[in-house]
Image (cartoon, rainbow, N blue to C red):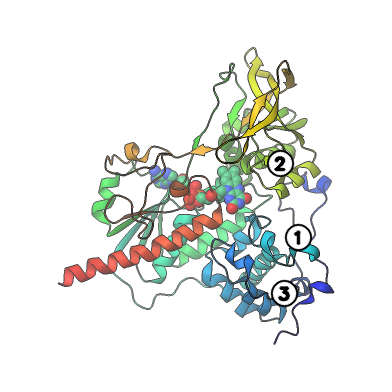
Amino acid sequence: MTNNLLRFIEIDQSYPNKREPNSRKNDFGEIYDDYSESAALNQASRCSQCGVPFCQIHCPLQNNIPDWLMMTAQGRLKEAYEISASTNNMPEICGRICPQDRLCEGNCVIENGFKSVTIGSVERYLTDNAFDNGWIKPVKILEERSQKVCIIGAGPGGLSAAEELRKLGYQVDVYDRYDRIGGLLIYGIPNFKLEKSIVERRASLLKESGINFYLNTEVGKDISFEQLRQDYDSILISTGVYEARDIALPGVGLSNIVPAMSYLTASNRVGLGDEVINFSNGKLNAYGKDVVVLGGGDTAMDCVRTATRQGARSVKCVYRRDRVNMPGSLREVNHAEEEGVEFIWLTTPEAYIGQKKIEAIRAANVRLGSSDSSGRQSPELVANSSHELKCDLAIKAFGFDPEDLKNSFDQPNLKLTGWGTLSIDFLSKMTSLNGVFAAGDIVRGASLVVWAIRDGRDAALQMHKYMQGLLLNREN
Ligand SMILES: Cc1cc2nc3c(=O)[nH]c(=O)nc-3n(C[C@H](O)[C@H](O)[C@H](O)COP(=O)(O)OP(=O)(O)OC[C@H]3O[C@@H](n4cnc5c(N)ncnc54)[C@H](O)[C@@H]3O)c2cc1C
């Protein structure tokens, strides 16, 4: 039954309505409206059902996209949702924040000439629709197992593993130092990309599935890692990467120079109704300020767009390479430009200037020189090009490194890579400690939600195999 497909020739690509910049700048709500049912069905029907589905190949979860697009086009929305959810623990979240332009949609074969199928928006519609219809239920366990699993970190990696292990009947305890479930989905990613109610809805479902959460509990501080090893049959470390990278520039001690995560966390907390002292006293609030964000990744994009919404007087993004060579998603750059952010390409900061508070940034122009070993052109300073940019809030978004878990978990035998991430066996996902597994950013370095989900699922399967082995050994 393919009569509802291959319609890319007659139906144009159409994303859900994007709110006007002047309206969306005034609040933190998501910028895209929902598809109507007919729009979702029509857009899904543009799929060409090509023989080799590059969308699926380029999805880290290998989501069976052509099949759920076909079901959607035929109005079989429940089946479509079930296929989509069979490979993805959070399709409503991936539908909203995956960089589809670089993954599934960027590799859609009709992209050349007809513009890709709007895969992410259909995925979001399918899952929201399934929630609205009550099709998404907490995990039901056929047979409880007595073996206990500990997951450290309630971000997308840890949560996906927790759900997969719970489906298999394990007793699952998740520890997190934050007071809410979701990791960067709650405290990193702003509402205009992913509203918190979407994350909270998923978290409630996991709680109703019988997964136990111990929040405000930092492993290595409130409870020792060694204690957890004694209490549980298997452990997953999915603690993400949080050490802000920095550049030692003159004037770095001036006030109003802040790391990106402190700034975004404060804004997200305020949105959630928390009292944040450094927001109320203006230190982490862009209102009325000339803001300069340093860096060109997705975190920098989230900062500039947050500052715009907080009512900054001006918002600039300073990045040492050009638009083509920036790490952030071009889709996000376009959103930021529409919202009035000024991008200053090929520019690097040299010093922070001011008396007590920052008043300006001294910056210099850069040209892209010869390529380095990775093929990227290296930035080279242009002589005598120093100039000042007015600034009374500087936000540093230079990237993240892992915390030193060997030290904070007091585990000298925990093997790290040269980058400080956890070293795991490629197949078994196990760290150098027996029965201790790892997933997500703490293994890959700062990456994507979809990769954290993939890693969490893979680790859960390997933990299951490991615990089956423990049982067999006990029986023999
Ligand atoms: C600002 C920002 C925007 C982003 N935007 C996007 C985007 O649009 N799309 C996308 O795909 N990706 C995005 N990412 C990346 C994405 O959020 C991460 O790749 C993903 O969240 C990693 O998941 P994780 O589970 O490995 O770690 P995290 O989400 O970081 O979760 C780790 C959890 O571990 C907890 N933890 C850490 N140490 C301990 C400890 N010792 N004891 C107890 N708990 C601990 C933390 O509190 C946290 O809750 C963004 C990242 C940032 C910073």
Q: Which mark is residue 33?
A: 1
Where's the N terminus, which quadrant?
Answer: bottom right
Number of on-image labels:
3
Is the residue 28 above or below the residue 54 in the image?
above
**Amino acid under disc 3:** Ser
Is the residue 64 above or below the residue 411 in the image?
below
Front position in the image: 297 or 371: 371
Q: Position of residue 404 (x, y in %)?
A: 38, 37
Q: Position of residue 63 (x, y in %)?
A: 57, 68
- Per the model, the C-alpha gap separating discs 1 and 2 is 18 Å
Whether residue 168 is visible, yes or no, is yes
Which residue is the extreme one toward the bottom?
Answer: 1
Q: Which residue is drawn at the image coordinates 74% and 79% (left, top)?
A: 5
Mark closer to the observer (3, 1): 3
Whether residue 186 is visible, yes or no, is no
Residue designated by label 3: 48
**Amino acid under disc 1:** Asp
Residue designated by label 2: 305
Q: Give the structural element (helix, strand or loop) at label 2.
A: helix
Q: Determine crowd level at label 3: few under 14, some 14-19, many 20+ residues with C-alpha closer than 10 A.
A: many
